[in-house]
């Protein structure tokens, strides 16, 4: 099992290296102008040189993402708990939720800017509005799948609705919840950058916008690399937390594998 | 067993004749739904069960056996009639009832030990001291029960590490941990193979003989009813009512070998005949 794991990781790393090497070779062979597609080595150099300038923007983007994410999680959990516990609430709210979630979020950024001006607030709100939906759905699903027999056993003991929610419903929801956090953090990140690109004077999204209007294409790509790195890092952190907290849900696989 | 001192659990058999009524259904009927879509689940049923009795309910499927269990546990209210459990009308919950279903429903994120202790987290007087005693007294209590059902040392395993039969034994432990005066079992061994089932009969009999709760067992298996019960009630097809109510006098502890003796087989045949009649009557009624 261990050997297979290592080999798998080696393949993944190899593919990433291969991708960059192929890109570099492509640019060198075709003599591509760096105004169109800069070489990856060039992008890395730019990234290192301009890092002191990029750093505050990275913090800005991370900050708005996390803030929007935390608000989105709070809202998502509350809404998910309400519609997961009550069948009526579920049926009533679902069409409206679907409606909200299917609006492309680029379309709402101008509205947020109209209300709150450009800058941090619309970025946070965009992150929030884009990331809360997967959490709502997952919490609601987790709560709705509680076994009726167990509920009967506890009700016969005189357990209140809250007892059942606290001891059975919420823990059962945790794997769903953490799986949705992984998705939600990526969404929040996308939302924050999106809003920065459209209307802000800070953040990685804004750096990329400014650089592209100055035809500083290597810097645009440097921003892209930063975004990819941050996205992977955020995803990894939440996968790690998921594994720690809800290991019971996947432990079955370990046993089969060993 | 280390348990709170409580008279009905000291292991002494309840003296015959001086029995207190534990469960009383008088003319209780249940109808689900209203108006045109009303489905009668249970006809007016009168049933009296004494404290410490082991009663099996048998009958064709869908005849309202489970409805009686749900009435007694307070999960369903009678549409008409009265249900009195432990001297109280059932509308008031928080009776000391232990329940077990065919599906053991152990929570996968807890060890077996902690699964079994779950009722202690809910029911008074244990609830208020749960945080204080869960690592000491309550855990010992759970392990003592596990030992009784032959699962010694499995307390810190997780449910997925146990077989179906083992989970069902743990399920019985969970139903008993809070020292219920009443144990309600809805086809608890229905999903198990024949041999595991017979093994669990002996375990359940042993548990009943030491703790002496009032047991109401719903089952399809006539041998199971004969092996375990001190009294068997046969029910008619839906809407159910009680057709026959007879005592089972075989000496305890009963063994699987006894279930093949002529007297036992005769009892089985008698029950079979009742249920077949009920089934054919129902088919004529509908067809």
Image (cartoon, coloured by chain):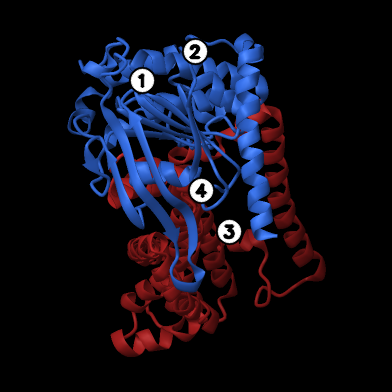
Chain colours: A red, B blue
Q: CA distance from mark 2 to mark 1?
A: 12 Å
Q: In the displayed structure, does residue A37 sit left or right of residue B48?
A: right
Q: Identify which residue is drawn at 52% across, 53% down.
A: B239
Give the chain of mark 2: B
Labelled pair 2, 1 in contact (Cβ < 8 Å): no
Query: Is mark 2 in CB contact (under 8 Å) with mark 4?
Result: no
What residue is disc 2 on?
B150
Q: Earlier in the sequence, mark 4 or mark 1?
A: 1
Same chain? Circles 1 and 3: no
Q: Chain letter of disc 4?
A: B
Q: Are marks 3 and 2 in contact (CB under 8 Å)?
A: no
**Residue position for label 3:** A44
In which chain is the residue bearing label 3? A
Q: CA distance from mark 4 to mark 1?
A: 37 Å
| Disc 3 secondary structure class | helix
Residue beneath label 1, please?
B142
SS type, badge 2: loop
Q: Residues within 10 Å of mark 1 (few under 14, many from 20)?
A: many
Label 4's element? loop
In this picture, residue A10 sits left or right of residue B99: right
Q: Earlier in the sequence, mark 2 or mark 1?
A: 1
Q: Residue under circle 4?
A: B240
Q: Distance of mark 3 from mark 2, alpha carbons?
A: 65 Å
């Amino acid at each position: 099992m261990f050997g297979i794991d290592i080999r798998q990781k080696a393949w993944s790393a190899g593919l990433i290296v291969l991708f960059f090497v192929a890109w570099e070779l492509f640019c060198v062979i075709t003599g591509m102008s760096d105004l169109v597609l800069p070489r990856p080595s060039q992008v890395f150099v730019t990234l290192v040189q301009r890092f002191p300038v990029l750093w505050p923007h990275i913090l800005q983007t991370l900050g708005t993402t996390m803030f929007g994410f935390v608000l989105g999680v709070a809202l998502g959990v509350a809404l998910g708990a309400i519609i997961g516990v009550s069948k009526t609430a579920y049926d009533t709210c679902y069409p409206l939720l679907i409606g909200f979630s299917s609006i492309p979020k680029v379309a709402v950024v101008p509205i947020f800017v109209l209300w709150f001006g450009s800058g941090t607030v619309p970025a946070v709100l965009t992150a929030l509005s884009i990331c809360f939906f997967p959490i709502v759905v997952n919490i609601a699903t987790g709560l709705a799948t509680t076994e009726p027999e167990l509920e009967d056993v506890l009700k016969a003991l005189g357990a209140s609705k809250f007892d059942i929610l606290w001891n059975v419903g919420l823990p059962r929801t945790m794997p769903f919840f953490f799986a949705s956090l992984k998705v939600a953090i990526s969404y929040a990140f996308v939302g924050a950058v999106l809003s920065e690109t459209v209307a802000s004077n800070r953040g990685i999204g804004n750096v990329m916008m400014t650089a592209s209007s100055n035809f500083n294409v290597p810097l645009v790509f440097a921003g892209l690399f930063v975004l990819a790195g941050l996205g992977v890092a955020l995803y990894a952190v939440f996968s790690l937390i998921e594994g720690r907290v809800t290991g019971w849900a996947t432990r079955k696989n370990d046993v089969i594998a060993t | 067993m280390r348990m709170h001192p409580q008279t009905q659990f000291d292991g002494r058999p309840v003296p015959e004749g001086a029995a207190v009524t534990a469960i009383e259904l008088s003319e209780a009927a249940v109808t689900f739904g209203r108006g045109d879509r009303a489905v009668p689940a249970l006809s007016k049923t009168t049933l009296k069960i004494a404290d410490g009795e082991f009663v099996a309910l048998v009958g064709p499927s869908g005849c309202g056996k489970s409805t009686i269990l749900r009435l007694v546990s307070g999960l369903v209210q009678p549409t008409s009639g009265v249900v009195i459990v432990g001297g109280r009308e059932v509308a008031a919950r928080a009776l000391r009832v232990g329940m077990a279903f065919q599906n053991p429903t152990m929570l996968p994120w807890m060890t077996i030990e902690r699964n079994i202790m779950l009722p202690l987290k809910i029911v008074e007087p244990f609830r208020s001291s749960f945080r204080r005693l869960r690592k000491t007294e309550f855990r010992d209590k759970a392990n003592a029960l596990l030992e009784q059902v032959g699962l010694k040392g499995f307390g810190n395993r997780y449910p997925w590490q146990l077989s179906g039969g083992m989970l069902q034994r743990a399920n019985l432990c969970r139903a008993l941990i809070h020292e219920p005066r009443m144990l309600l079992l809805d086809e608890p061994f229905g999903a198990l193979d024949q041999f595991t089932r017979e093994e669990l009969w002996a375990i359940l009999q042993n548990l009943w003989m030491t703790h002496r709760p009032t047991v109401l067992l719903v089952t399809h298996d006539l041998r199971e009813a004969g092996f375990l019960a001190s009294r068997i009630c046969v029910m008619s097809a839906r809407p159910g009512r009680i057709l026959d109510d007879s005592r089972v006098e075989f000496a305890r502890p009963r063994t699987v070998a006894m279930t093949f003796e002529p007297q036992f087989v005769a009892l089985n045949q008698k029950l079979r005949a009742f249920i077949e009649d009920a089934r054919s009557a129902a088919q004529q009624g509908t067809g």
